[in-house]
Structures are given as C-alpha cells and as structure tokens.
Amino acid sequence: MSRNNNLSIIIIAYNEEKYLPVLLDSLRNQSVKNFEVIVVDSNSSDKTPELAESFKTKFTYFKYLKLPYTKGPARARNKGIELASYERLIFLDADTRVRYDFVERLTKELLKYDPDVATCPVRIAEDHLPSNLGAMFLNSFMIAMKPVYSAAYGACLISTKELHLAVEGFREDLALCEDCNYVKRSRRQHGFKYKILSPYFYTSDRRAMKEGGIGFMLKYIKIHVFRMLTGKEILKGTINYEYGNYSASIN
C-alpha cells in the first residue's frame, strides 16, 4: 500500500477525563488537518466517554470506540488499528499533548525519511526540573543506544499498517515495554527501518511523581538493563503493574 501524508492518530485512554481533552484540543488546533482521530477507551468509569464524544463535531474525521474490558495499552492499540483509514499510524497516550505545528513537522519528516517505525523525543508538560532532566536523560539514552537497542516511547509511536500486520501487532502478554518490543521485532525480525524524528511531544510526569522520581527512573533503568542483557521480556504476572494505576514495582 502506498503511503501519503494522511495519518490515523490512535489515542488510547483509560479514566483520562483530566488529560484527554487537553490532547484533543492540541490536535484540534494543529496547523494542518491531514489526519483522522481515533479514541480507544478501555472501559473507563469516569467522564472519559462523554468528553471523547463531545469532540466528534470538532474534527472532520473522528471515531470513538469503547472497549467492554480493560486489558492494557497493547490491546487498545491493536483494536484502534482496526478502525484506521490510512496506512500511516500515529499512537498517542491520552496524557500527552503536542505543539500546534507537531503534525505538520512530523508529516514533513515522514515524507523526507520514510521510516517504517519511529518515535519522537519527550518533554515533560509540568514544570518540574528533576522530571525534565530525567526526560533529557531518556532521550539521550534512546538516541545513543539506537544502533544496538530498540528503545521507543509508546506515548508517541509511529508505524504503518504493513508493519503492524507483519509483526502481528503489539504483544498483549507483556506487562511493560510492549512498545520497545514492537520496535525490536520490527527491526530484528523483519528489517523495517527505525527512525527517531525531531518534533517533541509533551507528557505528564504523574507516574514519576506518584512513584517517586528517583525510584521511577531506577526501576526503568533496571528493566531496560534486564532486557538488554537477557533478550527476554517482562510478562504479565511477573511484575506489579496495572494499566492506569501508576504504581508499578518490580517483584
């Protein structure tokens, strides 16, 4: 399937009444409108469904899907792709937001480099210096390790339908790092081209604040070192993590 500059933006949400409207507003105010928006709700119990539905009239192309279960981000992303109209896929988490020119800049780089799978650097939405320093470290780690290790942000992940079909989607049996595993399988098993693009996206540091900044950073360093040294993944049931709970801890 040939690629053009049209995008399917798939947003996964679970009890995101506070953050989802901020992201949707940032998309509504983009400098270009070459995209559709698909919100996949993992059976939220707050006002997420009503708020998502209220944006239907604010986009030319908008779809909302409420799943009858809560089974994690991998399942939500996989279900969202079933509604996508375009070959190029952009996955965003509900607690992200983007600058007014994000889609325009992203589209230009996708046309220039034509990667099969890609991600973007992160910045922290809140004005917390330790969290922003941590984000800078993570960005540097991801760029430096790109030749030998597939790190990526699921909160802003770019793919294609062709690639998604080839790798058989996101692994729903993983507790964490389903995004990095998706990129790893794309590169190692299928030879797809991976690129780190330049437009930043913004995300909340609520998880780091809840778990403790240093502890949060050390936890994920431990996880990535384990994955690099063993080549193994962290399966559900081997780590205490609940989608939307933000209280994960390694057993």
Image: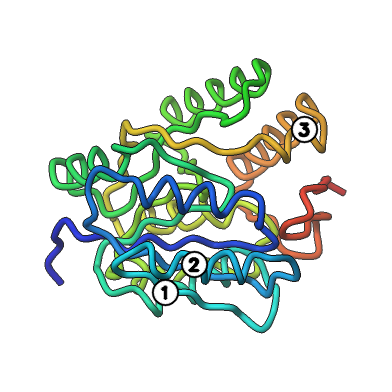
Q: Is residue 66 above or below residue 89?
A: below
User: What's the distance in space between the residues labelled 1 and 2, CA to CA?
Assistant: 6 Å
Q: Which residue is mark 3?
A: 209
The mark nearer the N terminus, 3 or 1, is 1
Viewer-nearest of discs 3 and 2? 2
Q: Secondary structure at mark 3?
A: helix
Which residue is pictured at 63% across the width and 46% down the height?
230
Q: Is residue 188 left or right of residue 241?
A: left
The mark nearer the N terminus, 3 or 2, is 2
The mark nearer the N terminus, 1 or 2, is 2
Dividing the picture into quarters, in which one does residue 159 lie?
bottom left
Image coordinates of residue 78 in percent, x first then y, are 49, 72
User: What's the distance in space between the residues labelled 3 and 2, CA to CA?
Assistant: 26 Å
Q: Report if the CB atoms under discs 1 and 2 are less than 8 Å apart.
A: yes
Task: Check the picture and name the quadrant holding the N terminus.
Answer: bottom left
Q: Determine the residue located farthest toward the right in the rendered image.
A: 251
Q: Residues within 10 Å of mark 2 (few under 14, many from 20)?
A: many
Which residue is pictured at 62% across the width and 45% down the height?
227
Q: Which residue is mark 1?
A: 63
Image coordinates of residue 178 in percent, x first then y, are 57, 57
Q: Which residue is mark 2?
A: 39
User: What's the distance in space between the residues labelled 3 and 1, CA to CA?
Assistant: 32 Å
Three-letter code, disc 1: Lys
Image coordinates of residue 235 in percent, x first then y, are 71, 62
